Image (cartoon, helix red, strand yellow):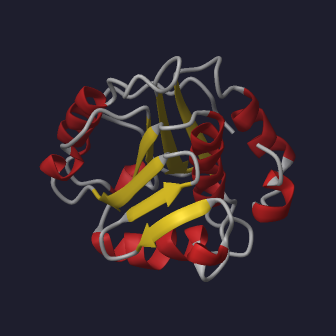
């Protein structure tokens, strides 16, 4: 997409670049990093990148709690490295609704965001991309993962679906999750 360099100012670290390079090679990926290492911005940038490459695509982004959506996801989305603040002034954005957890981009791409405090919060439309940040803090992870995987059926706008997780490096990974990419 032309003009991307002037509207998204995220420059990945070398290990984040490896994660992004596997975009279409690895279907389910995870980013394991320490506190403050850039998991959230890496995950959001990846979702945005996939959306921008696939007109009409639909993505969900989740934090473990609504408070984390307000404290982590929204400020990262509104950071100078992604869409800036106000988000609506970015030429890639058609509409943005913080309270509804909704962002629409210029070629019909949709990014929904919210929490996974309850597994049914992930119910809804078929989606192409799902990103779960700070997955180790989700209380009912196995149930949430089941719902998320049911949603990941694709809207028909991408060649294949994508599932991404972000974990704190010190987290113990349970619930049968076996990530395919470690950073």
Residue 14 placement (x, y as % from top left): 86, 44
Tell me which corner region of the image, top left, top right, bottom left or bottom right, holds residue 47: top right
- The C terminus - image quarter: top right
Asked if residue 166 shows in the view, the reply is yes
The image position of residue 75, as x and y in percent, is 55, 77
Q: Residue furthest bottom?
A: 86
In the depicted structure, whether residue 70 falls above or below residue 108: below
Residue name at image x 59 percent, y 75 percent: 87
Q: Nearer the viewer, residue 176 or 128?
A: 128
Quarter of the image that includes the N terminus? top right
Of the pair 105 and 61, the residue shown nearer to us: 105
Please provide percent x and percent y for residue 50: 61, 37
Left/right placement of residue 131 relative to residue 31 reads left
Q: On screen, 158 above or below 11?
A: above
> Is 168 situated left or right of 114 in this image?
right
Q: Residue at x 75, y 44 (%)?
A: 16
Residue 119 place in picture, x, y as percent: 17, 47
State the residue at coordinates (39%, 70%): 69
Q: Quadrant of residue 101?
A: bottom left
Query: How many numbered circles does the render carry?
Result: 0
In the depicted view, which residue is nearer to us: 15 or 106? 106
Q: Is residue 62 visible?
A: no
Q: In this picture, is 16 found above or below 64? A: above
């Amino acid at each position: 997409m032309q003009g991307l360099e002037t509207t998204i100012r995220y420059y990945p670290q070398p290990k984040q670049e490896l994660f992004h390079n596997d975009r279409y090679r690895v279907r389910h990926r995870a980013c394991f990093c320490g506190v403050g290492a850039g998991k959230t911005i890496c995950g959001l940038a990846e979702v945005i990148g996939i959306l921008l490459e696939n007109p009409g695509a639909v993505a969900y982004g989740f934090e473990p709690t609504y408070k984390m959506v307000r404290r982590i996801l929204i400020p990262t989305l509104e950071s100078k490295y992604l869409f800036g603040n106000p988000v609506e002034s970015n030429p890639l954005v058609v509409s943005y609704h913080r309270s509804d957890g909704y962002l629409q981009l210029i070629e019909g791409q949709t990014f929904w965001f919210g929490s996974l405090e309850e597994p049914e919060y992930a119910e809804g439309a078929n989606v192409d991309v799902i990103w779960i940040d700070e997955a180790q803090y989700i209380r009912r992870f196995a149930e949430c993962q089941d719902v998320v995987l049911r949603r990941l059926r694709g809207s028909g706008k991408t060649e294949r679906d994508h599932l991404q997780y972000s974990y704190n490096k010190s987290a113990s990974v349970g619930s049968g999750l076996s990530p395919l990419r470690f950073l």
